[in-house]
Image (cartoon, rainbow, N blue to C red):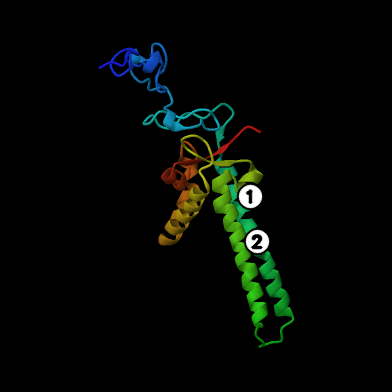
Amino acid sequence: MTDGQGGADGWDAPGRGPHGSLPPWYGGPGGYGGAPDPRARPAAYGAPPAYGYAPPPGYGPPPLPPGVSYASWGSRALALVVDSLALFVCVAPALVFTAVVASRTRPGEDLSIAQGVTVAVLFLAGIFAWLYNYCWTQGKRGQSWGKRLVGIHLVRELDLNPPGGGMGVARYALRSALGNATCGIYSVVTALWPLGDDRNRTLDDKILHTLVIRRPR
């Protein structure tokens, strides 16, 4: 059957739609004789990523854009040191309050309920602030406090965009769980893994398909 617009069902030639229009996936003239052009981005891919590229399925990660490089082990280690110090800063108010209360308490005297609650609230608030930055913010924006200071970014391997807050939480949970399960062995191995990896990745990066990069300023 034809509808008067061309060939069968309105398609007047291979690779052409109703009224002679080209379907979205067609790569243009010379596009493999009317077959879908594997170099063309399917409409289902959505908006282009920040760096304007995404590989066809099965082609693996693309090369880095000009000016972008893999973060060195030294820069990643420095960012981790800064983030570790930030944890101490976050819980410092609780430690200071506890020290002040202890200095004013008589030997053998316990903290009052109000003082105990205050210490707990300050401590939990500090831990939450640090976890929010190190997990959620690092995943959503690509940078924790340490990475921001050093100038490196956590990104997805596929398109070099931040992996998302959920992935940031999963990344921290994975490292913590495997580190505890192996009595810290995994934590040491994954921290040193970038020294022998061609893209300076940790084991967490390899498992979750993330990278840490340095972008041009």
Q: Position of residue 48 (x, y in %)?
A: 51, 30
* Three-letter code, disc 2: Cys
* Three-letter code, disc 1: Trp
Location of residue 22 (image quadrant): top left
**Quadrant of image for the N terminus:** top left
Position above or below: 173 against 99: above
Residue found farthest to the front: 4
Identity of the residue drawn at 54% across and 47% down: 139
Identify residue for label 1: 145
- Real-space CA distance between mark 2 and mark 1, rounded to the nearest whole angstrom: 12 Å
Q: Position of residue 85 (x, y in %)?
A: 64, 57
Q: Dot 2 lies on which element? A: helix
Identify residue for label 2: 90
Identity of the residue drawn at 50% across and 43% down: 163
Q: Earlier in the sequence, mark 2 or mark 1?
A: 2
Q: Dot 1 lies on which element? A: helix
Residue found farthest to the left: 1
Name the foreground residue: 52 vs 36: 36
The answer to whether the residues at label 2 and label 1 have Cβ atoms under 8 Å apart is: no
**Quadrant of image for the C terminus:** top right
Q: Position of residue 116 (x, y in %)?
A: 64, 78
| Count of numbered tags | 2
Q: Position of residue 94 (x, y in %)?
A: 66, 69
Position above or below: 127 against 82: below
Q: Residues within 10 Å of mark 2 (few under 14, many from 20)?
A: many
Location of residue 142 (image quadrant): top right
Identity of the residue drawn at 46% across and 41% down: 196
Q: Residues within 10 Å of mark 1 (few under 14, many from 20)?
A: some
Tell me if 19 is positioned left or right of 78 in this view.
Answer: left
The tag on residue 161 is: none
Position above or below: 51 against 2: below
Identity of the residue drawn at 45% across and 48% down: 204
